[in-house]
Image: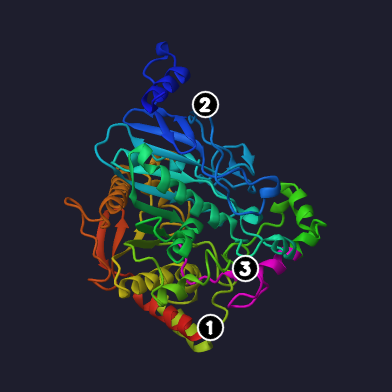
Amino acid sequence: MSLASFLLAAVLIMTPSEAGPPDPVVAVEQGVLVGRTDGAVTSFKGIPYAAPPVGSLRWRAPRRPAPWTRPRDAGQVGAICVQPPSGGDPGVGPLPMSEDCLTLNVWAPAERTGPLPVMVWIHGGGLNNGSGTAALYDGTNLAKRGVVVVTVNYRLGRLGFFDHPALAAERTPGEPGGNYGMMDIVAALEWVRDNAAAFGGDPGNVTVFGESAGAAAVTRLMISPGARGLFDRAVVQSGLGRDSGVPLDRPSAIGGPSLQDRGAAFARTVDATTAAGLRAVPAEALLRPAPNFYGGDNLVIDGQLVSEDVEAAFAAGREAPVPLIIGTNSAEFWWIRPSEISPYGAIDDALTSRERVDLYAAYGGEDGYRAHVVSDLAFNEPARHLARLHARNGHPTWLYRFDVIPDSNPEPSGGATHASERPYVFDNLHTVGRPMAERDERAADAMAGYWTTFAARGNPNADGRAVWPEFGAQRDRLLEFTNDGPVAGPIPFAERLDLIEAYYARVR
């Protein structure tokens, strides 16, 4: 039977003629998928890009998915990966929850001519929460702009970022370990490379974009030899930049136990001492206590996929030479104070008295310092720093600041809080759950437009919108998304960031 005849038979099997227009059908490497059409966009959901990482495959690198022989229904999203309760984050999709969660979702224009840019979304959530299945990340409205959108689930928490001496002992020479969530993301990009054309996508024009921990994953993709060539552009939304990872078998650069030592300490709490014993631990028991993202539990230097910290790689010019959009929000962690006992609260602990006095003055006093310094230390200065390094290394770079605050925002944040840009990027304001104004619609149209134009051209600029200055050509100028529209200008509060840059230079 020819491929065309097989696809026609698949349509007739899955969608009786009396049910209306046939559902869309594509053939990928593993078999035939039957999706859905919603107006001008087709979608295919719950597609396995790797074998279920269960049983003996828990804490193993992802394996290729098994083929299927009959047409596979791709009308529903798959299970989210095992994670603790989300606390209301709209970036977490619907239950069920399962270790069998390595799926992705695809949206594409129903009518297209020629290969289209592909945008692969890496969700945030501290590498402990989140999924590519959330309504917030529905790719329909981006796909209407002429791109193929892919969202990905990857292993989280101790199922995704964990090692133990017993697990290390059973690995064969050269077998990767510890950084399983990142391995999953690379496997998903390999699947996109091999199958994007089936959906009308161009495997030679792939943009990876992510937010928070997902953006930190993007910067790690940029420094990973295993990911080189799997993407052509990158977008980093609130993705840290000066954070330190923890190696598998030695302390991190800033101190603290290795990943294997951390794993051994946790294993004692569940009475597991062998690899088989660890794999027998119920998945839910691995959630307590929650691993710490910024404290090093989940940011892993495994020696193969990721061999160094992001800042060091960018400083040495070892990052992927791809066009980059990078930026932050105006009030990222407005609720975290530097006096808190947490990894974020500790990042100013090495300040000298002189440095602290100068920073207090730059922030207009102690209250201003306490309100904004954690955001600047963790996000704003590191984003500027990576932008400077990438531009210095000769690569096209665009920096942004997001400062759109809806009138209906209930938070006393004084700006745009962490993750609040997501519904604007996806043009999915209807998922926010509160009234949004016409100005928010314009902001969403602008952000989605810049992002999809960047995916298509490697440059976010197009006729009819504010010109976004390229960072290498116009140093320290950015595009600020405001309630009155996008505005190009100098980096706000640069004097604060200069003091923080000097602090980092001294302590590192």
Principal secondary structure, stretch drawn in magenta: loop
Query: Magenta segment: does it hold 406?
Result: no
Kindly check if marks 2 and 1 are in contact, taking CB atoms under 8 A apart as contact: no
Real-space Cα distance between discs 1 and 3? 16 Å
Amino acid under disc 3 = Ser
Is residue 388 in sight in this rendering?
A: yes
Residue 183 vs residue 414, the one in the foreground? 183
Q: Which residue in the structure is indicated by mark 2?
A: 70
Q: Residue at x 37, y 37 (%)?
A: 198
Mark 2 or mark 1, earlier in chain = 2
| Percent of width and height locating residue 267 | 77, 60
Amino acid under disc 1 = Leu
Real-space Cα distance between discs 2 and 3? 51 Å
Seen as rendered, the residue at the extreme bottom is 354
* Magenta segment: 239-264
User: Callout 2: helix, strand or loop?
Assistant: loop
Q: Is residue 148 above or below residue 165?
A: above
Q: Which residue in the structure is indicated by mark 3?
A: 342
User: Where residue 351 is drawn, which disc sits there?
Assistant: 1
Q: Quadrant of the N terminus?
A: top left
Kindly check if marks 2 and 3 are in contact, taking CB atoms under 8 A apart as contact: no
Q: Residue at x 21, y 56 (%)?
A: 466
Seen as rendered, the residue at the extreme top is 18
